Amino acid sequence: MMFRFLAVLCLTAVFALTLGDFALQNLALGLGMSAVLAGLYRDTLFPRSPPRSEFVLHIIINLPKLLAMLSWDILKGTWLVTTFVLGIRKLDHPGIVRIPLGNHSPPGVGVVGLFITMSPGSFLVDIIWDERYMLVHTIDASDPDQLRRDVERYYKLWEYGTHIPMIMPDSPDHGGVG
């Protein structure tokens, strides 16, 4: 119960920080919205059983590497987009890359999709659950295999026990989908 109360307070603080205003009416609105959202998504936010200790240890050990990789990708993406905007490089190879999901869990796919989208120059377009792949638009799709390797590294750092990459059969390139 105490954890839920703290989560609602943290959500309210994020709301107020986003607005940049801690006026009483904004705090009341944020508290109300946070309580409603925490109630609607309680099964997702507050799992009934705590995560396994192996998973927690895996995250603690790999979190510095994960944050370093994410920070590097954000810096690299920012520089890449800057070079295109300033006209230093020509925009020759934008496209959509098809990335297999393998046996990765839906929460893992969601988090990795968020990581991909955080880096400038790449964006998660869609996840095709039936066929187990995601589509990622990237500003430089000249090396789709490198993007696939980077995504697998994110999975490896984030997920525990479900990291089983799946190699997709070779398929012809259709409209930039690699």
Image: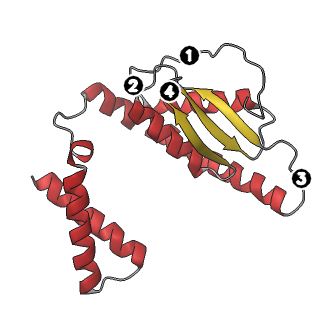
In the image, taking residue 35 as reference, residue 108 lies left or right, namely right
Image mark count: 4
Residue drawn at x 36%, y 83% is: 21
| N-term-proximal mark, 4 vs 3 | 3
Marker disc for residue 89: 3
For label 4, the crowd category at 10 Å Cα-Cα, with few meaning under 14, some 14 to 19 and many 20 or more, is some
* Secondary structure under the numbered disc 2 in the rendered image: loop
Q: Which of 23 and 127 is in front in this view?
A: 127
Picture coordinates of residue 70, whole percent (x, y): 57, 45
| N-term-proximal mark, 1 vs 4 | 4
Residue assigned mark 2: 160
For label 3, the crowd category at 10 Å Cα-Cα, with few meaning under 14, some 14 to 19 and many 20 or more, is few
Q: Type of residue at label 2?
A: Tyr
Residue assigned mark 1: 166
The relative height of residue 155 versus residue 168 in the rendered view (above or below) is below
| N-term-proximal mark, 2 vs 3 | 3
Picture coordinates of residue 96, whole percent (x, y): 71, 38
Marker disc for residue 156: 4
Residue drawn at x 70%, y 49% is: 76
Picture coordinates of residue 65, whole percent (x, y): 52, 38
* Secondary structure under the numbered disc 4 in the rendered image: helix
